[in-house]
Amino acid sequence: MTIKSDIEIAQEAKPLPITDIADACGMDGAYIEQYGRYKAKIDNRFLKETNRPDGKLVLVTAITPTPAGEGKTTTTIGLADALRRIGEESIVAMREPSLGPVFGVKGGACGGGYAQVVPMEDINLHFTGDIHAIGTANNLLAAMLDNHIQQGNALGIDVRRVTWKRCLDMNDRQLRFLVDGMGGRANGVPREDGFDITVASEIMAILCLADSVSDLKERLSRIVVGYSFEGKPVTCGQLKAQGAMTALLKDAIKPNLVQTLEGTPAFVHGGPFANIAHGCNSVLATKMALQSADYVITEAGFGADLGAEKFLDIKCRAAGLVPSAVVVVATIRALKMHGGLPKSELGHEDLEALSKGLPNLLRHVGNIRNVYKLPCVVAVNKFPTDTEAEVACMMEKCRELGVNVVLSDVWAKGGEGGEDLAREVVRLCREEKGDFSYSYELSASIEEKLEAVVRRIYGGAGIRVLPGAQKQIDELTALGFDKLPVCIAKTQYSFSDDPAKLGAPEGFTVTIKNLKVSAGAGFLVALTGDIMTMPGLPKSPAAERIDVDENGVISGLF
């Protein structure tokens, strides 16, 4: 039996005109800005002019990711399709792919198998240009900052304390650290500089958290780009850059509407990379979706310790959102890796490794139920290599431990394979009521907030703050930024800051290396371990396998 690739399945699809998808959301033509036949942006006036009661918000998250794959996006899409199949009105609200992982490791981020959003080639590549606009706005601010220094530096910016980096939507380790402004007086003031990947830019988080164009402009003005010789923060507003930056972002802030393979509406807008950034799709897209359907299925990046934590502690707090239920995606393959089985052996049945890997799942589920106090179900994303004995073992052990678990087969069967999961999600939303709480209070100190996440969410013993980071904490506290939430940049491969510690490690400390304020986004960013905000390409990047023929048909995306 030949298994079709994701892109082959997507290319065989016959999508509906995007106007039909908008009609299904209750949007008339006045709100739609078409980008061809199958993509559109939705004018933010829709939110102001519609008065439908909000639907139920369902968050899809996952266990700690492994190279074996978890299928969080696939489950998100398949669940939304499944809800429609059982007669419920649903919509997807998910994150945009970044070109970094598309050409690096993942090769795409539109779901998989028969649970995908389309047109997947467009979405995985330039889409509607949002990320390019974010990068351009970011780099306009960088250019205006350095021009200000070159033209006399009236604000007294200390070039040794510039915190604003340039960005590029590509994995390029060569650009992490560099010196620019070389070549004499006419070419600028020499200083140490560097690039982040665009999706780690504060502007991505600002775009995702802003609820209007005016809010976007105000947030941009608050960006701290560096510090003066007197130690005072210097802002984007002082550089008078926010107006031009907002002009560049005026279309990017509008949510993008596409569809699943089964014609379910899908908002795809902003927010990847919860390991190094905020990692959630836009507030506007989520709120638009809530006004358009009875059930909104959204996702947050990587494992629940990263994406779900930031979704719940940052996005929900900022936007006043409360999920009705949470889905934690797990695979038998990934749990076997957490149980010590190497990737090369995952095709073989191993009940012992599966059992040893279960604590990783249990910690994520425990966090959702006991810390955030939300109704939860585990979706076991079925792989063709899973044996009947492994599936039975997984389901039995979860139920023995009091874990609500459902088998999902959306990769192979689309919405049909997620109907059991859909029925359980509906039951959770209707019959179980959560008591939503955050993992920390904003009134706590910076150190206390970091400790709370490490102890309560990661399961660690505490934090170790390096001297440089402690100095930054003291300074940010003195400047009044200590009451902001924290956005922790950490490896996605472990609860700890060491990617080699799989499963559910205990007794570890997390090293805080660097701390900075994202005043526009409204949070503090803490860098831990060896995490970097500009990834590199692997030895054999996915880009090597991507091609296009004479007729413009793309291959190799998955």
Image: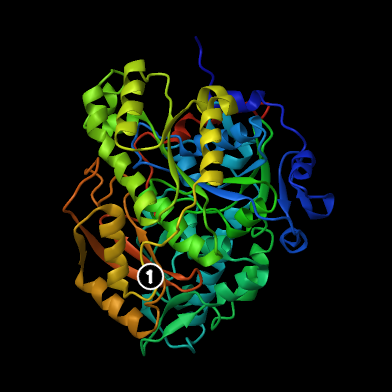
The scheme the figure's colours follow is rainbow
Q: Is residue 426 above or below residue 452?
A: above
- Position of 159 with respect to 447 (left or right) is right
State the residue in front, 444 or 463. 444
Instruction: Assign a secondary structure to mark 1.
Output: loop
Residue lying at the far left in this picture: please name it.
Answer: 507
Question: For mark 1, does the 10 Å Cα neighbourhood hold few (<14), some (14 to 19), or many (20 or more) residues?
Answer: some
State the residue in front, 315 or 18. 315
Identify the image quadrant of residue 329. Answer: top left
Q: Is residue 428 above or below residue 16?
A: below
Residue 13 point in image, percent of width and height: 67, 26
Whether residue 165 is visible to the viewer of this picture, yes or no, is yes
Residue 3 point in image, percent of width and height: 51, 16
Whether residue 277 is visible to the viewer of this picture, yes or no, is no
Look at 39% across and 50% down and name the residue there.
368
State the residue in front, 135 or 17. 17
Q: Is residue 517 above or below residue 227?
A: above
**Which residue does the numbered mark 1 point to in the structure image?**
441
Residue 416 point in image, percent of width and height: 58, 25
- Position of 523 with respect to 454 (left or right) is right
Look at 38% across and 52% down and name the residue there.
306
Residue 351 point in image, percent of width and height: 25, 23
Q: Is residue 401 above or below residue 306?
A: above
Residue lying at the far front in this picture: please name it.
Answer: 431
Residue lying at the far right in this picture: please name it.
Answer: 29
Look at 49% across and 65% down and name the residue there.
317
Amino acid type assigned to the residue bearing label 1 in the image: Glu
